[in-house]
Image: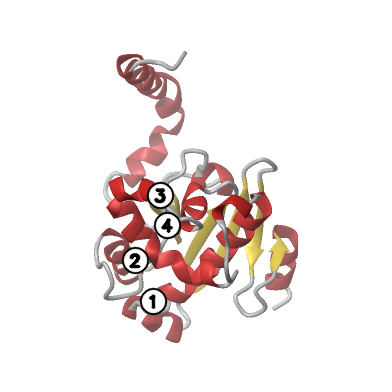
């Protein structure tokens, strides 16, 4: 039986108690050092999906990642739907001086499933979701005619990967990103996270192929 709103809220508060009692004391010096500012190395853009924990996946501490989460890890092109995502990109690049931007998609993505069937009447009651996902439609177009009933896990994975590559393209329309790239101060990279295996693959924009983390590290070390 699913927990009630009150029960789930109590569970969250009990988690806070555990943090106060067991976690904070062991990391007090770190938190105190972060109290007056931040200097993250990376802007990490990923899906709102509850199964994704960026800090756990990357084994980073508080203060190392500047995280943006939204449905479908979407980056609207500059000038289109200026808002939270665009302002976070601008702030992280121009003020925080992040050195990397990662766009991370994932397996079994509900947004990618929805993208296959945006004309469905179920979205009549979710017009905001439908409009938001329009920023990923070009990824779906790479598959040609696609019927929702024919979509399986591999199709969703491929669509999620194409979407990551599309959002990297959208990133390059943002003036702050373009300037930092031109000065050699910023690197962009696309990732795909497989929830079941815990594996990350790195997506290459030029070849549109995917590589293991080991292969990606070897490639960068040899450059």
Is residue 99 something one can see in this rendering?
A: no
Q: Residue at x 48, y 72 (%)?
A: 138
How packed mark 1 is, by other alpha carbons closer than 10 Å (few <14, some 14-19, many 20 or more), is many
Q: Which mark is residue 29?
A: none
Asked whether, in this view, residue 77 is left or right of residue 57, the answer is left
Q: Residue 157 at x, y = what percent?
A: 63, 56
Quadrant position of residue 56: top right
Asked whether, in this view, residue 18 is left or right of residue 108, the answer is left
Quarter of the image with the C terminus is: bottom right
Q: Residue at x 57, y 49 (%)?
A: 58
Q: Residue 163 at x, y = what percent?
A: 52, 65
- Judged by depth in the image, the label closer to the viewer, 2 or 4, is 4
> Which tag, 2 or 1, sits closer to the chain's start?
2
Q: Which mark is residue 177?
A: 1
Q: Which residue is mark 3?
A: 63
Q: Which of 107 and 11 lies nearest the eye of the viewer?
A: 107
Quadrant position of residue 210: bottom right
Marks 4/1: CA–CA distance: 30 Å
Q: Are circles 2 and 3 on residues that touch, CB within 8 Å?
A: no
> Which tag, 2 or 3, sits closer to the chain's start?
3
Q: Which residue is mark 4?
A: 118
How packed mark 4 is, by other alpha carbons closer than 10 Å (few <14, some 14-19, many 20 or more), is some
Q: Are circles 2 and 1 on residues that touch, CB within 8 Å?
A: yes
Q: Which mark is residue 89?
A: 2
157 vs 178: above or below: above
Marks 2/4: CA–CA distance: 27 Å
Marks 2/1: CA–CA distance: 8 Å
């Amino acid at each position: 039986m699913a927990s009630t709103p009150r029960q789930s809220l109590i569970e969250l508060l009990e988690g806070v108690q555990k943090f106060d009692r067991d976690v904070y004391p062991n990391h007090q010096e770190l938190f105190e050092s972060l109290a007056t500012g931040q200097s993250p190395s990376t802007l990490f853009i990923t899906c709102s999906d509850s199964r994704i924990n960026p800090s756990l996946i990357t084994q980073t501490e508080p203060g190392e990642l500047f995280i943006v989460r939204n449905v479908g890890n979407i980056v609207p092109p500059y000038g289109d739907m200026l808002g939270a995502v665009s302002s976070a990109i601008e702030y992280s690049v121009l003020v925080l001086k992040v050195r990397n931007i990662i766009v991370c998609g994932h397996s079994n993505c509900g947004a990618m499933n929805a993208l296959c069937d945006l004309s469905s009447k179920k979205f009549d009651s979710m017009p905001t979701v439908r409009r938001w996902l329009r920023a990923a439609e070009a990824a779906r177009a790479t598959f040609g005619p696609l019927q929702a009933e024919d979509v399986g896990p591999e199709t969703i994975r491929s669509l999620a990967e194409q979407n990551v590559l599309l959002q990297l393209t959208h990133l390059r329309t943002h003036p702050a990103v373009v300037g930092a790239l031109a000065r050699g101060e910023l690197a962009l990279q696309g990732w795909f996270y497989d929830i079941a295996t815990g594996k990350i693959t790195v997506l290459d924009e030029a070849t549109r192929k995917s590589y293991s983390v080991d292969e990606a590290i070897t490639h960068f070390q040899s450059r």
